């Protein structure tokens, strides 16, 4: 039976509670029996617990889930996955929370089997549980799912594989950069930040030319992890991107790699979007070159308060560097 009650704490022992007057006696008796099993470390039939997970009474559901967790029986994984995919958000969250505590190989076998379930929601619940474990035995089934027809599955698979932080998964993650779904591509690009730049630079350049601006922004951010002349050239070449979010992220990466300031960066001081002007100020400030103070001075009358403040601080910093240099 599908519950419509939200999960919340209720003091069932409070004699003044309205629930004491409306709950059937058999429900109260069942709750007492479940509670006693928990308190006395007594076993309770697993099949019965599985059926009680969807009981109409909130305390029964909670106690059943608590007992399933406590008994740590791997056979509980399939019904827990079903519950974690339930339309009742409270039940789904509670069941997913219990899945975290099953840490034996048999439990992992059930979770991996859940990846092949007919229900998309169950498959996603299994993926969520496997991501926390990062089990070596799950790698091969996960890589296979990179070709799944369901985009929701591919998104979760890429995120799960990325969480392993393993060099032998780089090829799989690189292939995801070319996926047909922009979210899959973005997640894959973000994962490449953890690898050696020489191995992923080409993939990041491909992503930097992606049709989706979120993928391009992720590529701009990732490139900022790998300082080199080639990186600086690639970043500068994209400062005319039509998406201001990409331009701002590109400027941030240029600042992180301490790229020299040129006309392409100075031009962004006049960008119509304040966030871009702020990023340009940061890039210029990171150059440590006092020659650019006059360019920043023009922003002291900017219409955006954050831009004015950032320009003022950058001028103070670069002027101090100049004074220190002159005193040597």
Image (cartoon, grey):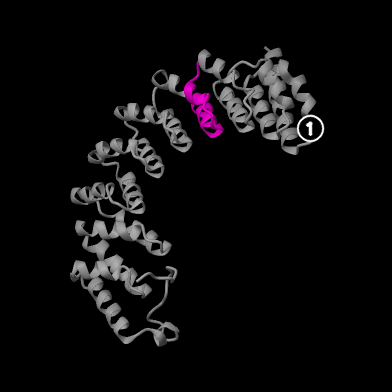
The quarter in which the C terminus is drawn is top right
Above or below, 106 against 326 in this view is below
> Mark 1 falls on what kind of element?
loop
Q: Which residues are magenta?
A: 205-228
Judged by its main secondary structure, the magenta piece is helix
* Image coords of residue 158 (percent x, y): 38, 37
Q: Which residue shows up at 28% across the image and 47% down it?
A: 115
- Give percent across and percent down for residue 312: 74, 30
Q: Look at the image and tell me whether residue 116 can be seen.
A: yes
The residue at which mark 1 appears reads as 302
The image quarter containing residue 79 is bottom left
- How many tags in the picture? 1
Magenta span contains residue 63? no
Does 68 sit above or below residue 215?
below
Please say whether residue 210 is one of the residues in the magenta stretch. Answer: yes
Residue 226 lies, in percent from the top left, at 47, 21
Residue 120, percent from left and from top:
35, 51
- Residue 230 is left or right of residue 117, and the answer is right
Residue drawn at 66 percent across, 15 percent down:
262
**Left or right: where 63 falls relative to 226:** left
The residue at the far right in this view is 301
Q: Quadrant of residue 34?
A: bottom left
């Amino acid at each position: 039976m599908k519950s419509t009650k939200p999960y919340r704490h209720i003091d069932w022992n409070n004699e003044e509670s309205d629930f004491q007057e409306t709950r059937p006696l058999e429900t109260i008796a069942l709750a007492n029996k479940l509670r006693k099993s928990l308190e006395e470390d007594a076993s309770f039939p697993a099949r019965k617990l599985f059926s009680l997970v969807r009981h109409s009474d909130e305390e029964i559901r909670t106690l059943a889930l608590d007992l399933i967790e406590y008994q740590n029986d791997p056979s509980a994984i399939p019904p827990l996955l079903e519950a974690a995919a339930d339309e009742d958000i409270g039940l789904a969250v509670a069941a997913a929370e219990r899945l975290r505590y099953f840490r034996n190989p048999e439990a992992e076998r059930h979770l991996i089997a859940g990846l092949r379930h007919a229900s998309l929601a169950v498959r996603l619940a299994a993926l969520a549980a496997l991501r926390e474990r990062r089990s070596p035995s799950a790698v091969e089934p996960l890589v296979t799912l990179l070709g799944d027809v369901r985009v929701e599955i591919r998104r979760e698979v890429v995120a799960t594989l990325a969480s392993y932080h393993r060099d032998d998964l780089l090829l799989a993650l690189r292939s995801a950069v070319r996926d047909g779904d922009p979210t899959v591509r973005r997640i894959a690009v973000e994962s490449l930040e953890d690898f050696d730049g020489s191995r992923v630079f080409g993939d990041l350049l491909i992503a930097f030319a992606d049709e989706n601006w979120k993928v391009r922004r992720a590529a701009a951010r990732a490139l900022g992890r790998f300082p080199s002349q080639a990186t600086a050239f690639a970043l500068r070449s994209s400062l005319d991107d039509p998406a201001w979010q990409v331009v701002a992220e590109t400027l941030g990466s240029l600042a992180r790699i301490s790229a020299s300031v040129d006309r392409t960066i100075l031009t962004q001081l006049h960008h119509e979007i304040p966030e871009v002007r702020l990023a340009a100020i940061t890039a210029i400030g990171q150059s440590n070159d006092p020659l650019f103070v006059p360019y920043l001075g023009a922003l002291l009358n900017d219409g955006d308060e954050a831009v004015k403040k950032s320009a003022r601080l950058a001028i103070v910093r670069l002027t101090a560097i100049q004074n220190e240099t002159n005193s040597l």
